[in-house]
Image (cartoon, coloured by chain):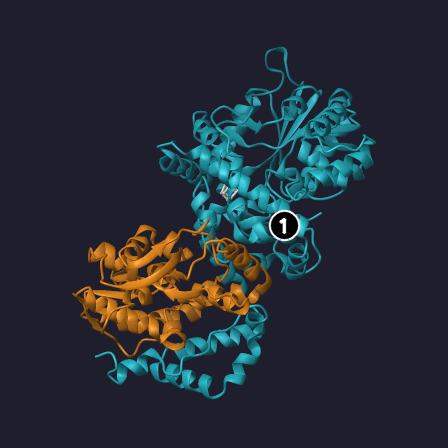
Chain colours: A cyan, B orange
Amino acid sequence: MSIVHSTRPFEEDAKKALADDTLRGALRHATDLFAGRRLASIEGIDDWEDLRERGRAIKEHALFHLDRYLEEFVANGERAGVKFHWARDASEACRIVGSIAARVSARKVVKAKSMTTEEIGLNHALEGEGFEPVETDLGEWIIQLAGELPSHIIAPAIHKTKGQIAELFVDKLGIEPTDDVLQLTAAARKVLRSYFAESDLGVSGVNFGVAETGTIMIIENEGNIRMATSLPKAHVAVMGIEKLVPRFEDLEVFLRLLPRSGAGQHLTSYQSILTGPNTGGEGPDELHVVLLDNGRTGMLRREVTRQSLACIRCGACLNVCPVYQQIGGHAYGSVYPGPIGAVITPQLAPGDRSSKLPFASSLCGACRDVCPVKIDIPALLLDLRAKVSADGPALERRGFRLWAWMMRSTARYRLGAKLARLFPWAWRGRAGAWTDARELRPLARRSFRERWKRGELA
Amino acid sequence: MRVSLFVTCLVDQFWPEVGTATVEVLRRAGCEVVFDERQTCCAQPAFNTGYRDEARAVAERFIEIYEETDADAIVMPSGSCGAMAHHLPELFRDDAAWLPRAERVAAKTFELGSFLVRELGVEELGARFDGRVTWHDACHGLRDLGIRDEPRRLINAVEGAELVEMNAADSCCGFGGTFSVKHPDISVAILDHKLAELRDKEVDAVVSGDVSCLMQIGGRLQRQGSGIRTLHLAELLASGVEA
Ligand code: SF4
C-alpha cells in the first residue's frame, strides 16, 4: 500500500469533505483547541524562539551529516544489544517486521501509534501474513475498529465526534449506549489491556534516535507505548532514517519543543528512553530497530527539500492551516496530511495525485510560523509547484507564457488592458471559478496610469 | 524624501482609487512621488504558481526599471507584492549577475503602511472617517514582512474611526492568488469562516493592505448582500481630507 490512499482526484475528496458538516464541526473544534493549547503552553517561555532555532540547527546539522550519524547510531546501539535492519522501502520494512513476528511466534502484535508504520502500511502487510496487529493508542484503535484511516498526525480520530465513537463502541464492543467519556474510555481500556497480556511482539515508531548512545526515545500520553515496548518478548521500532539527533543532550531541546507544539503540553505523560533490550531486568529480550529509507535519501540531496526531513511530526502546522481546518486529513488522500503532508507526500510517493497537493495551499504561511523546527513550508510548496508546473496543464502553461510576454513590455501590457476592456466576454466568461460564489470587481474604466498621465494627480 | 510608486497591476487595472489615495497619503507625509510609467507587474502570479522562468522574465524587467530610479524608496500599496519584491533574490539565487541587482532593488522596496510608520515615523495624517472599521491582516504583509502594529497605529490616528478587532484578524481570507480559482470551494469555505467573525461586530468597513484580499472579501460580502464595505488602508488614510 502506498502512502497515497485515495484514487479520486483531490478536488473530489475536498468537495466531499466540505459537504460534511459533522466533520467540519469536529475539525473546527479540535484544531482550535490544539492551536489554543499550543499558544497557552508557550506563553511565558522566554527562549521559545531561541529554542526553535536550536531545534532547527540540530536537525539541519544531523541531516547534513546523516551518513556519519547513522553509522555512529548503529555502532552504539549494537553495543547495547540492539539489532538493526536496513529497509530500502516499505515492502522491505514490512517483510523484516513480519519475519521477526514469525520468529518469536507472535500472533497478536500490539502496536504503538506510529506514522512511520502507517507510511509503510504495516498493519495491512501483517494481516496478509496471518498476524493480528492491534492498535493500542485509543485514537488509533478507534480508527482501526471503524476500518478508517487516521486524519491527523497526532490525533488520528480528530475527525470523529464523541457521538460517533459511542455508536462505534456499541456496535463493535457491545457496550450499553452512553455518551459518558469516562465509561467509553473504561470500555476501551478493558479490551486494550487484555491485548498486552496476549502478545509476544510490540511494534512502535521512534520520535528521536540518539547517535551518541544508540538510544531511541518515544513519547506518548496513554502509557500504551510503555506497555507495548516492555511487556512482549520482543520490540521492533520502525524508524525513518531522518529521526537522528547527534547527542543525548539534544533530547532536552526536543522534549521542550515537541509536546508544546503538539498537544500544547509542557511535557508528555510518558517518555520512554530505550537503550538496548532488557535494561535492568525489565523490558523485552529483543530490541530491533528497522531503519527506513523509503525515498528519504532522495530528499537529502537539495537544501530546500532536505528541510522536509527535519519534521518532528508534531502536527502544529495542521492545526493552524486554513485548508486543513476546512477539509481535514482524509481529503489529502495521503497518510501525511496538512501542510507538511502536501510537502512530503509528492516527494515520498511521486505521482499524479500527490503532485497536486502543493497547490492545495493559499501560501498564508501560518504553518511556518508555528513549526517548532522552522521548516519553511511555503518555500517548499513553491519549490514543488515549480517542479510540477514545468509539465503543468497546457492551457495554463501557455497562459503564463503569454502573460510574461505581456508583462515584459509596457506597450503590450497597455494593449492587453485595452483589449480586456473592449472584449470583456473573452475573459469574464472564463471567470466562473471565481464568480460562482463571489462578485468580480469590474475593471476600472480608466486605469491608474491613465489618470496619472493626464495629470489628474498633479 | 523622493518615493517611486509601484502601484501594482491589480490596483492599476481594478482599483485605481487606491493608487490615487496612495499618492495623496505619501504627499501628505512629505514625500515627493514619482511614477515610472514603464511598470507592469512584480512577477508574483507566476512565482506563486510555480512558473519560475516566466516569473524570472517579468522580475528582470521589474528590476531593470527600479534599479534606475533615483528615488530613495520604492513604495507599493501591497504587502504581497512587497513580499514578492523581497523574494526576488530567491528567484535569482543561482544567477551571479542578477542576484546583486535583485538584492539592491529588494532592499529599497517597502509596503505603504510600514513605510509610513517605520521609515518616515508618521502616524497622524489628518484623515477623518466616521465609522467602525476592522483590520484584516493580509498574510504576506503579516508573515513575510512582519507588519502588524503599523496599520493599527495608522488607523487609530484617523479621526472618527473606531478600530474593532475581529477574532483571528490574522487568519487567511482564502485568496491565495491562483489558489482562489484552482480550489474555489476551499477558498470560499476559508473566507466564510473568516467572515463569520464579522457577524456581530457591526463594522462599516473591512480595511486591509492588499486589494487582492479585499477583492476576495468584498466579492463575497457583495454576493451575500452585506452592507459592509471594503477599503484599502490608503483609501482610509486619504479619506475626509480636502484635496
Ligand atoms: S512540519 Fe513542523 S509543524 Fe508541521 S508537523 Fe512537522 S515539525 Fe510539526
Location of residue A138 with respect to A354 vertically, above or below: above
Q: In this view, does A340 lie to the left or right of A171?
A: left
Towards the viewer: B150 or A97: B150
Residue A39 point in image, percent of width and height: 45, 38
Secondary-structure class at tag 1: helix
Estimate the x, y position of residue B28 in percent, counting from the top left. Answer: 20, 67
Q: Position of residue A359 (x, y in %)?
A: 54, 60
Q: Can residue A130 be seen in this view?
A: no
> In the displayed structure, would residue A417 be above or below residue A344?
below
Q: Quadrant location of residue A178?
A: top right
Position above or below: B124 against B13? above
* Residue B150, horizontal then vertical, whole percent: 29, 53
Q: Which of B96 and B87 is in front in this view?
A: B87
Q: Which of the chains bears the disc numbered 1?
A: A
**On the image, which quarter does residue A150 sit in?**
top right
Looking at the image, residue B171 sits to the left or right of residue A102; the answer is left
**Residues packed near mark 1 inside 10 Å, few (<14), some (14 to 19) or many (20 plus):** many
Which residue is label 1 attached to?
Answer: A24
Q: Tell which residue pokes out farthest to the top in this image.
A: A281
